[in-house]
Amino acid sequence: MGDTERNTTELTATQYVILAENQRKKKALADTKSQFGRVADENQALLEQLEFTQRENYEVTEHLREELLHKSQQVADLQTQIQREREQHAAELARQEESAAARQATIVEEANAAAAAAAAQIQALTAQLMSVSDFQQHQAEVEAEVMRLKEENQGLREKMESQRVDLERYYLELNQKQRKEWEQRLEELKKAAEEEVDERLDAAVKRILQQNRRMAEELKIHVQETDMLQGEVRLLEQERARLTREVKLKTELEEGYAKRGAKQAAAIKESAMKIATLEGSLGQVMEDAERERLALLQATHAQVSEAHAEMDALRRLVKLKTRELKNTRRLAQEVLLQRSDVETFLLSSLHLVRKEVERDSMREVIGQGSDKNGGQQGAGSKPSSARQQHQGSSSVFLTEGGGNTGERRCTQASQWRKLLYVLLRCSAPHYFCKVLGSGEQMPLGDSSAASYTHILFSRKHLHAIQCSSAVKTTRAP
């Protein structure tokens, strides 16, 4: 009876210790939640500030882009205006040249009215005489060339005919000679084959087949050579026909050249006279046009220099705006780098939670071992009933449904994992990591993924703690 009361008193003290420890953990958990809430609020404020900065940078960039497009449009308009002025200048120059040509023609007509008839008659007679003499000379040359080509054509024709006859005779004789030789050789081969057919039938058949193949190849080569020579004969015939056609074409061309030469000589003389009269007036017109062109070029260069100066100013403005944008981006990057404080806080919190879980597991294992040792020394005959009473009383403060020590440890580990998952969800929703071996994906930054790897809980780690605790519990003396 005394042993039972002492066990009850010890169990009650253990329950109070567990209750006090649970209260302390709840308080620490509340503090951790409040700290996580503050960190989450700060993180949200930083995100809003970053979004505002990015939006402002985007607006500034759009404004600069619009200004750049506007200035580019102005430059394009100026270039279009310059091109239009150049075209107007060219059109004006063409009109002035036409007016100068008209004035020059009028002056020439008034100056040469008296001597036009006599000069025209003299020029016509001179041109006719020169054209007749040129035509006679050219006609003699053409006739000599035609006679030479006819003689050459006749010689080629006779030569080709003799070559064709000789080739036909040669190939006929060669064909007959080869045919006789092959027939004689075949007869000899037949005789030799008939003589040796009894002694060496297989070897003779093979040799005959080889000789037949060789003869067939040689005959094929001769046929190919014959075809090649016949093709050459046909090519020579075609060449002769082509040369005949060329002679006829050259004769016709020479006649046309003679007529065209007479007309061109007259046209050239008339054009030379017109050119001589136009050169004087054209020089004056060109001088006037050159002066106007220089004036227009000076005005255009002034406008282009102004446009280039404005473009340089715009480029400097764009560089300044780009530098401001880079500074803004650098500041935003510094704001993003300040997330390391939040990550440090999360690391320290996860370390604390892990240590608490390990400490609770070890405390439960030590408490269970001491309770079992005390119950066996005091009650001796009823260890199982005292152990069951201890488990039932202590489970009231840990779980609501009651159960063994392994179930309580699994429940506590699951509760800690859920708590860490909720805290990370609330504090850092834009980071990525694997949470507590559950296989779920949780956001966590790329820069801190390696830092979190060594502190993550896993099912294997918790299962190892539970197995070690169960082994220590079952090894009662």
Image (tube, rainbow, N blue to C red):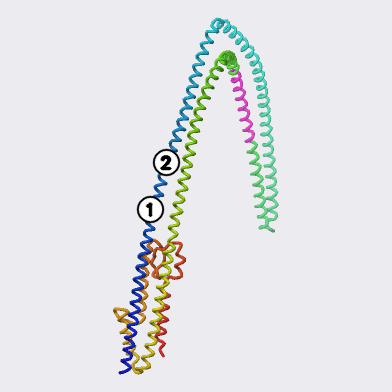
Q: In which image quadrant can residue 370 be found?
A: bottom left
For the N terminus, give its image quadrant.
bottom left
Find disc 2 in the rendering and name its residue.
Answer: 67
Residue placed at 41% from the left, 73% from the top? 352
For badge 1, the amino acid type reads Phe
Q: Nearer the viewer, residue 370 or 250?
A: 370
The relative height of residue 85 versus residue 440 in the rendered view (above or below) is above
The relative height of residue 94 versus residue 77 in the rendered view (above or below) is above
What residue span does the magenta drawing correspond to? 230-255
Residue placed at 29% from the left, 78% from the top? 400
- Give the number of the disc on residue 52: 1
- Give the number of the disc on residue 81: none
Q: Secondary structure at mark 1?
A: helix
Characterize the magenta stretch by its predominant secondary structure.
helix
The relative height of residue 208 versus residue 247 in the rendered view (above or below) is below
For badge 2, the amino acid type reads Glu
Residue 270 percent location from the top left of the image: 57, 13
Question: In the rendered structure, does residue 148 fall within the stretch colored magenta?
Answer: no
For the C terminus, give its image quadrant.
bottom left
Residue 295 percent location from the top left of the image: 51, 24
Circle 1 Cα neighbour tier, 10 Å, few/some/many (<14 / 14–19 / ≥20): few
In the rendered structure, which disc, 1 or 2, sits on the residue that comes first in sequence?
1
Residue 16 percent location from the top left of the image: 32, 82
Residue placed at 51% from the left, 11% from the top? 106
Q: Nearer the viewer, residue 388 or 324?
A: 324
* Marks 1 and 2 in Cβ contact (< 8 Å): no
